[in-house]
Amino acid sequence: MAAILIAAAQQARANPAPAAAASPSELAGEAAVRDILRPLLHQAWRGIQQKQIVFAEAATGTGKGRLIASLAASAARRGGTTVVIAPLSVAYQLVTELRDIQTEVKPLLLLGRANFVDPDKLKGLLDEEDHPAVRKWYENGGHPQAPELKGLSDALHVPLRWLTEDALTMHESLHIADCLLNDDADAQNPAEHAYRAAFEKVAQLQQKGGNPLILCSHLMLAVDSRLKNLHKEGSAGVLPAVIDTLIIDEAHLLEQSFAAVHANTLHLHVLKRHLRDAALSAAARRALENAFDDLSGTVRRLTVGDPVNGKLDDFPKLRPRLRALATQLRETLGKQGAKHALAKVKAARRALGYARQTLDNALSGYSILQLGATPVRKYPLAAVLTSATLYAPDAAGQQSTAHMRWMLGVPKNRACYLAPVIPAWVTQSSDITRMPSELAPDDSDAWLTQTAMQLERVYQSAQGGTLALCTSYATVEAMAQRLAQRYPHLLAQSMSNSASRCAQQFRQQFASGIKPLWLGVGNAWTGIDMADKQAPAEQDLLMTDLYIPRLPYGCNRTLTHRRRVAALGFMVEVHETARLLKQGVGRLVRREGLRHRHIWLADSRLTQPTPHLKPILKLLSAFRQRTFR
């Protein structure tokens, strides 16, 4: 998937901006970058000038954001279009970093419609439910209220309004899913206007010969790549056709975003349920049900013993049935019309329309389709690459980025590897205790009970808050059932209680004198910063203990990853596990000078003498080792 990204970058560099390249001494905001990162900054900038694809790693807490802000501002000042890819929470921080390094460059933050609340729908909700803070926010025009968002508007070309994240901070039980902005919103809708404003500003700057600096998510880059490959004209993407400098933060997340966008999953049982809600004629519904049943039967016959369900071209017999279903959906939806007064009917028809578009894309050959005939619970199926985990131990235990280069499809002749910056305090600020369970980590009742008891011991001994990093929502739910009665303040992450929401509640509990306990999963491994910046480092007790009941094997569930494992063997999974584990343990140390930090590992596999464990044990050996008592 990422090969598409690299090809786009090559095309962009074939049309270099006319402005002369700056020397390292002219880097924007260089003085604000920490001394320990300045050599990396200069090397990365040199790589950009030489049209290389640079791999740069700096440990969490070293000030990587300032380095990225300096590179981005310098590239924008040099000329052309600069795009910085980062998780949304990190993008917010980068806006602040760009403001704080005091350059003349103002970025543009491109968000998706799901990041905005539709004020018309919100008004309907407020008419039914009493949310005083949300009502005041609505009446004041949806301007940012959350502390981390308030200062961003002044630092952007286009001010922020009607943000979903902002609304959620005001009321934790707000039914926000019913109020999100959709693509059928009127152009005069204030949230639709806020959504379009940044994209229109990019176009205006380009028309005037300006040099836009764009910040957006990994997912938006993947969507842009997909649209440009489905529509060969090159005008259908969400990002500019030519990108002169591309900077990807948290680059280890890129492959999963591309896989998620390019490999759509259709659950046939869910689509059949939508048929009942779509208010179709009896004949149309019967024809579609027959098409679904024919496709479901074919999928079952063709995928016996194949859990991946394969790529579309692997099943020649499947193609005509997919085409028949797509045609039937197109004809039915065209006859029935898209407009209907009932929200339930509109939602069902929208889901069927999405299925039709997905089938068309798959049949075009530019997308991978993954079909599910049974429910799958909980889980949805110049470049600078920066991260805290680009490098991981290889099979020999040596630090290497070969796996990441190969996974992202970076050509060997353009790859430039910079030595990672990992200060000693990153590993010396915490110790690791292995407390392996006698039981296999299989989610059995016995293992879950023992794991809950272990976590209680860790929590009771902790001087501050505790985060338990789990590998599935099912584990979180089962652990919560065993702990919630004794710990009513327990934070259990779920599909409706996100990592960012749990992090906010964690801070609120700590501020009120409660020692927090959080069962985390998913983004809790990679996307949170639980440092108490209001306290000196030596007094920061916000989160002091990290408990990992089992190694994060199997957490990358993308179709592309599973195909790599099938083709190349289990070491691909080991590399992925080591990378995610490195991210996970990095949640604990976010600044220099911390004390009382403890990491607890309970996986029984850590005691097994297997070659597969060598990269993981090498990773853990960098920390102080403590004996479990």
Image (cartoon, grey):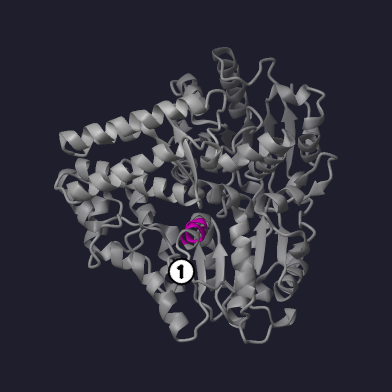
Residue 66: x %, y % from top left: 63, 66
* Residue under the point 78% across and 31% down: 612
For this view, does 478 lie left or right of residue 271? Answer: right
Magenta-highlighted residues? 222-227
- Label 1 sits on residue: 233
Chief SS of the magenta region: helix
Question: Furthest-top residue in view?
Answer: 446
Q: Residue at x 53, y 23 (%)?
A: 304
Residue 51 quadrant: bottom right
Residue 91 in the image: state x and y as whole percent.
Answer: 52, 61
Using the rendered image of the protein, determine whether residue 248 is visible from the camera's viewpoint.
Answer: no
Q: How many marks can you see?
A: 1
- Is residue 5 shown in magenta? no
The image shows residue 215 at horizontal and vertical percentages of 51, 66
Nearest the eye: 447 or 263: 263
Q: Residues within 10 Å of mark 1 (few under 14, many from 20)?
A: few
Nearer to us in this view, 78 or 16: 16
Up-down relation of residue 590 to residue 562 (above or below): below
Q: Is 225 within the magenta? A: yes
Task: Name the kind of residue labelled 1 in the image.
Answer: Glu
189 to 404, vertically: above or below: below
